[in-house]
Amino acid sequence: MPEITPFKIYSDNKNIKYSNKIINQIKITSNASVISVDNPTIVVDTKTIAYGVFDSNGKFVKQSLQYRGKNHQFIPKSVPHDAPYIDSVAVLVGNIYPHFGHFLVEQMNRLFGAINQPRDIKYIFMDNRGIGAQNFVYEFMAAFGVDKNDIIILNKSARFKKLYIPSQTLNIKNAIIDNQMPLGYQKMAQNTTGGGYDRVYMSRAKLPQTIRTIGEEKIQKIFEKNGYKIIYPEQMSIAEQIAAVRDARYLAGCAGTALHWAFFMKPGGTVITLKRNLERDKFVQTQHMFNSVCGLKSIFVWASVEPHKSNHGGKHPPQIIGATQYIKQFFDDFGFKYTNSDIAIDNDAMKEYQEQYEKYISENGSTIRTKILKHMVKIISCFIPGRINRNRARKWLKSKLHI
């Protein structure tokens, strides 16, 4: 079994202890496989968001399960007899999912099983929510070497001549990852050209105001002074982003999706994560899991100077980073050159943060209120029978409570 790669954490003792604990929960496996099913039916029901693969005898194929933690998707109750027949051999890739980062790692982790398939094969994405495919789906597959005409987005059931089903190689909630997962991403990297940067900093500074990280511009300038190429992912195509990191020995940036591009790096590199929030979360675990399976080293630096703790993901108050004692220690340990002005307190950034925080509170209420309401929704939904009904109830309650 592959080993977890080295890591270093710049933070206080409590965060270091917690991070070590959750990193030790990572499990790297070597169980990935690809099975084939003749004359299968892929059942997709957008009303219940259920989906799955059934063989020619109507038996559910367990390899098509998509786990998140101990739960998996809703499984259709029956196989429709009138599902249209598509005379093609296909490979199951994943689901259509609106969040870019989750799509990148949770819905494309079966790509390893599509590398050695016949050239005339079709590539299946299931649209069980009926939301349609965003352009990045086609961009990723183009980088993999797949023409748009060979991609099938299924929002209703269909039968196929033959279907290859690679196993799921990532259960992000349970911190389980298979060492075959990076192979699909590495193929994309091999297919791209350009870039060629040795050190890359992926910035959030040009994201919309509601989600960007305040104060990042000042920190990233220090990286730039020390040889890092600053890139803004949202201004680049998928192929350009892959090319930018494929040869990098160092990839840095604030915690988030941008650092998941580590999958496109070559083994032996280092990923530098600036933690942009103070609330404890499992991003350290997730990122180090990805780094480890790719043979990369990890550095985590607590950079948040937010007066009010926020969560990493979801709907949260504004976030702000600055030259904390941990960033200074990291800079010094790695020989970064900087001036006193470079690491001085950014009063303008803090003023912006306070303005954004007040706006957030006026629109959403206090963070304590939000936590209480989320907890209430979780408790109430437990009394509703059936996973589908519970899921619908949670979404309805959250929309009504604006959380």
Image (tube, grey):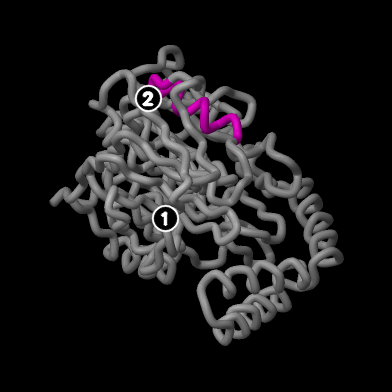
Residue type pointed to by label 1: Val
Q: Is residue 136 left or right of residue 294?
A: right
Magenta stretch bounds = 134-146
Residues at marks 2 and 1, CA–CA distance in whole angstroms: 35 Å
Secondary structure at numbered mark 1: loop
Secondary structure at numbered mark 2: helix
Residue beneath the point at 56% across and 23% down: 237
Task: Name the residue tied to disc 1.
Answer: 79
Q: Position of residue 31 (x, y in %)?
A: 17, 50
Give neighbour class at mark 2: few <14, some 14-19, many 20+ (Cα, 10 Å).
many
Q: Mark 2 or mark 1: which is in front?
A: 1
Q: Position of residue 60 (x, y in %)?
A: 31, 57
Q: Earlier in the sequence, mark 2 or mark 1?
A: 1
Residue 145, quarter of the rendered image: top left
User: Is 164 a magenta residue?
Assistant: no
Foreground pick, 394 / 353: 394
Task: Name the residue tied to disc 2.
Answer: 188
Residue 263: in sight, yes or no? yes
Q: Main secondary structure of the magenta part?
A: helix
Residue beneath the point at 50% across and 40% down: 154
Residue 379, quarter of the rendered image: bottom right
Give neighbour class at mark 1: few <14, some 14-19, many 20+ (Cα, 10 Å).
many
Vertical side of 144 occupied by 391: above or below: below
